[in-house]
Amino acid sequence: QVQLVESGGGLVQPGGSLRLSCVASIRIFSFKAMGWYRQAPGKERELVATITSGVTTTYADSLKGRFTISRDIAKNTVYLQMNSLKPEDTAVYYCVATTPNNDYWGRGTQVTVSS
């Protein structure tokens, strides 16, 4: 059973930074890709960033330059570095891992950007 556990969320002021972590229960090179999505209140879940097994990264156009996805295979962890945070970045952030047969989701971590 694959488990993904996110951490690192919290309350931050506008312009601040946070780094989210997603720890997987199995070796992450087993996944075709991993990524982050987010869901704000009253809105649909949206893609934030992905990283493939070949370390190709993609980002939502609106987030390029502020967010960076990375991974540490030795720690079975994927990170999302978020800089210059804005109130509109407030959302629950979810980690996802993709295999040829399944997508696995974490339970999410809350990020609130407010003064």
Image (cartoon, grey):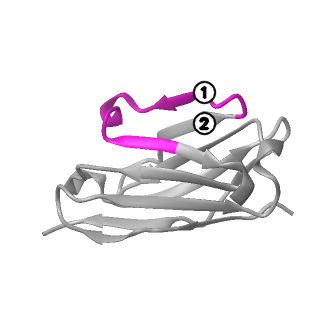
Q: Residue tagged by mark 2?
A: 51
Q: Position of residue 40 (x, y in %)?
A: 36, 56
Out of 85 and 100, give the one closest to the viewer: 85
Residue visible at 50% across and 43% down? 69
Q: Residues within 10 Å of mark 2 (few under 14, many from 20)?
A: many
Kind of residue indicated by mark 2 = Ile
Q: Residue tagged by mark 1?
A: 56
Residue visible at 80% across and 40% down? 99
Q: Residue furthest front?
A: 74
64 part of magenta stretch: yes
Q: Which residues are magenta?
A: 53-69
The part of the image, by quadrant, that contains residue 2 is bottom right
Horizontally, residue 10 falls left or right of residue 23, namely left
Q: Position of residue 37 (x, y in %)?
A: 50, 48
The part of the image, by quadrant, that contains residue 42 is bottom left
Determine contact: label 2, label 1, CB under 8 Å. yes
Kind of residue indicated by mark 1 = Thr
55 part of magenta stretch: yes
Q: Position of residue 75 (x, y in %)?
A: 70, 59
User: Which mark identifies residue 65?
Assistant: none
- N-terminal label among 2 and 1: 2
Out of 100 and 22, give the one closest to the viewer: 22
Q: Is residue 41 visible?
A: no
Q: Residue furthest bottom?
A: 11
Q: Quadrant of the N terminus?
A: bottom right
Q: Position of residue 100 (x, y in %)?
A: 83, 35
Horizontally, residue 68 falls left or right of residue 29, namely left
Q: Residues within 10 Å of mark 1 (few under 14, many from 20)?
A: few
Q: Which structural element holds mark 1?
A: loop
